Amino acid sequence: MTPASSTSPARIRAERDADREDVHTVHAQAFGGDEVVPRLVEALRAAEAPIGPLSYVATVDDVIVGHVLLSACRLDAPHRLVDVLTLSPLGVLPDHQNRGIGTHLVAHALAAADAHGIPLVFLEGSPDFYGPRGFERADTVGFRPPSLRIPPPAFQVARLRSYEPEMTGTFVYSQTFWDLDCVGLRDG
């Protein structure tokens, strides 16, 4: 796991309850005004889970400009279920994009997951963005996606220090992702 270098002036810290409105704004703006992602964040915060969620904000001059959330999911491995995390969503205000803030948030999220003893972090996203930040194509290293609607290059994993080679199998999103229809691409 070697995240790309960052020139981000942002500071990363754990999200606080008082940050929720600002985090909502970050995702609404980062995703073009769509409310699906802000609703996903709220639902993941409220869901009961064995791990997390781990939620971090990026601030510039004490203003929240970015957010990343890691939430509990499972790997259906041949011999046991493995608690893993998914990195979703990652958002940065449009005026602050392309400044290394997303890179900084991803690096912080992976370090936090590793510190919690999490073996794997999965996501759906651009291999061009996430590849240099510690992720690799998951289907080529022993993992199956939870949906056929996920393009194979977009299904990615970061293997952390507590990863063991027998941890292979099918990645399973938490029920929240399915309830909000946030898995894979939909036509239209």
Image (cartoon, rainbow, N blue to C red):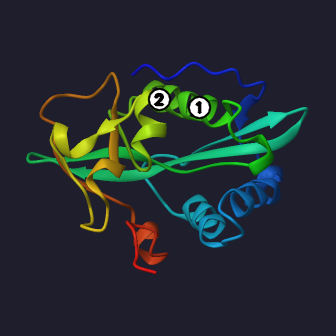
Residue that appears at 45% across and 56% down = 49
In terms of depth relative to the viewer, which is nearer, 157 or 83? 157
Q: How many marks?
A: 2
Residue that appears at 35% across and 51% down = 154
In terms of depth relative to the viewer, which is nearer, 22 or 114? 22
Residue 154 shows in this picture: yes
Task: Report whether 51 appears left or right of 14.
Answer: left
Q: Which residue is mark 2?
A: 133
Q: Spatial distance from mark 1 to mark 2, Cα to Cα?
A: 7 Å
Q: Which residue is mark 1?
A: 103
The residue sitting at the left extreme is 78
- The reply to whether dot 1 and dot 2 touch (C-beta < 8 Å) is yes
The amino acid type of the residue labelled 2 equals Arg
Q: Quadrant of residue 97?
A: top right
Residue that appears at 35% across and 27% down = 160
Seen in the picture, residue 11 relative to 70 is either above or below; the reply is above
Please rate how many residues cluster around mark 2, counting C-alpha atoms within 10 Å: few if below 14, some from 14 to 19, many from 20. Answer: many
The residue sitting at the bottom extreme is 188
